[in-house]
Structures are given as structure tokens and as C-alpha cells.
Amino acid sequence: MAYQSVHLDSELSIEKIYTIHYYEYQNDFYFSGERHNFWEFQCVDKGSAEIVTDNGSHILNRSQVIFHRPNEFHTLKAAGRTAPNIIVISFSCDSPCMNFFENKVLEFSDTECGILGRIIAEARNCFVSPLDNPCLEKMEKKDDIPFGAQKLLTLYLEELLIHVIRRYTMAHYSASAGIYDSCQSTSETCRNIIHYLEQHIRESMTIDEISKSNMIGRSQLQKLFRDQYQCGVIEFFSRMKIDFAKQLIRENDMNFTQISDFLGYSSIHYFSRQFKKLSRMTPTEYATSIKAISELPQRHS
């Protein structure tokens, strides 16, 4: 039996890390600005900060983050009465997916804040330089770095960026995946409709809206899904939503009310009824079930 290896693409790769800083600023701190030929992001851990870039001024509050593309000018000053704590990480990455972060102010989830915490912890393992020196331009490595710490530092940063891209683009929340066919064996019309439903997963949809938007008759639409999936298109859409809800529960970044709102349900009570109807357990029962635990994403300890 001849085994063959499988090539795995690396969609995101960190080439170099320049700085990893955790600053506790005074409430009157002001940095006049800089630009450099590598990426940088600033994340507020406490208080507020005002960031000025080539694209305007932004106020960041706790857990919010702004990314600066290479050669983008940016300043930083404390905003409000509370002295801010700010994390600044700069790195080199030429991966095309980094275009996602341009001109965006985002908010890290609890999971992403946890990953960021691991990055800071590994930075302390790797560098003798203090992480709270805003004037430091080159970080000095320790002589006795724990085994694997430098690799973990890069991996955690890549994990953080990948997690953010996935969460905001919903790329890994393919709502029609899992119990559903990938649709490769179905018609182009079916594939287009499912793609349309995925794009509108956070909304409430009617048969008329789906048929009109996809230029297909109502009866033809129903027949298409009954032939392929043994259910009507609205039931199919409802199952997609609940599968998406299960994914969000496993991610543990939102509570049930937030998930209900995120997916466009009229109330938490209606969401819970739909969840139990289609999964035969309540959201709480699912969250604590062996099934949910077994499907949790693998994470570093």
C-alpha cells in the first residue's frame, strides 16, 4: 500500500515579529505618530484611546482593536479620564488575507482576548526586554527561553488573526455544512440559493423573498428543496440557522440572547423553541451535552 502525503496550504503566515507591548499609559499620554513598513494593531484592554490614521480619527474602547497596514500613518493618545491599558503588536505578514484588516476597527471576542493573553504570556517567556517600554524599538531575547515558546508566539498570533477573519466573514460557519450535502451534485440553481441563504443567515426570510431574489417560482423552489432535502426551503433555512447557533454555542463567545439577536430571531423564547424543535434539546442542554463538548474546536492548553 503506497501512502501519499497531502499538501496543506498556509493561507496566513507571520514572517517576523517586531514588537509585543502591553502599556499602562497615563491619562494624558500622547504619541505624535509614525509609519513603518510592517503591520501593527492596537487593542484597548482598559479605558479608551483615540487613534488617528490616514483614514481619519477613531475612538477605541475596551476589547476594540485597529489594524494599521504597512506604511499607514497612525497616532495614539489617551481618551477620557481613565488611564488606558493598550496592547501593541507589530509584525510582518505578506499573506493576501491580511487585506481583510485594512481600514477596520474591530472588537475582539472573549476567545480572541484569551488568545491575546497567551501571546503576552509567551512574549514574557521569550524576551528580557520590558513589555511596557513605549520607546523600545528592538526586543532582546532571553538566554533561557522555554522550549517551543518562540514557535508558540508565532502560532498564537496566526491563530488570533485566523480566528478574527473567520468570525467576521463567517467562512468557517458554513451553515449548510454538516448534515447537508455540499451541493456539488445538485443544480447550479440550488447551489446559488443555498449561497444566498448563507449570506442572509442573520435575517428572517419568507418563501416569496427567497423566490423573488433568486428568480424562481415559489412552487418550483419548494419542489427543488423537497426533492433534494425532503423539506421545504423555510425548514431548510431554519435548520441552517440552528446549525449556525450550535457553532456559536460551541465557540462560547456569545450568550443565548446574543445568539438569538445575531441570527435575527424575534425573541429568545422563539429561538429556544426552534432550537428544541430541531435539535431535540434546549440551548442550555446542548451547551452542556457531550455532543457539544466533543465538537469544540481544538485549542492549545
Image (tube, helix red, strand yellow):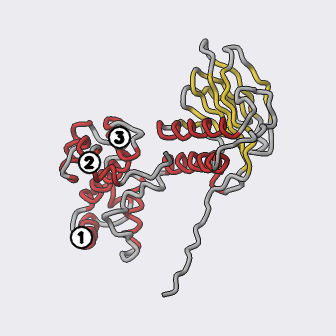
Residue 296 x, y percent position in the rendering? 39, 51
Spatial separation of the CA atoms under disc 3 and disc 1: 31 Å
Q: Is residue 230 above or below residue 167?
A: below
Q: Mark 2 points at which residue?
A: 289
Residue 144 x, y percent position in the rendering? 71, 41
Give the foreground label among 2 and 1.
Answer: 2
The residue positioned 57% from the left and 39% from the top of the image is: 118
The residue positioned 31% from the left and 50% from the top of the image is: 292
Please tell me the numbered disc located at residue 194: none
Q: Foreground residue, 2 or 288?
A: 2
Quarter residue 121 falls in = top right
Query: Quick one: label 2, few (<14), some, or many (20+) residues within 10 Å?
Result: few
The residue positioned 24% from the left and 73% from the top of the image is: 227
List the single residue furthest toward the bottom.
1
> Horizontally, is 33 left or right of 115 in the view?
right
Tag 3's secondary structure?
helix
Q: Foreground residue, 147 or 168?
A: 147
Residue 29 x, y percent position in the rendering? 72, 18
Q: Mark 1 points at which residue?
A: 223
> Horizontally, is 186 left or right of 218 in the view?
right
Q: What residue type is labelled 1?
A: Lys
Q: In this view, does 17 lie above or below 51?
A: below
Give the foreground label among 3 and 1.
Answer: 3
Residue 245 x, y percent position in the rendering? 33, 48
Q: Mark 3 points at which residue?
A: 259
Q: Which amino acid does label 3 sit on?
A: Ile
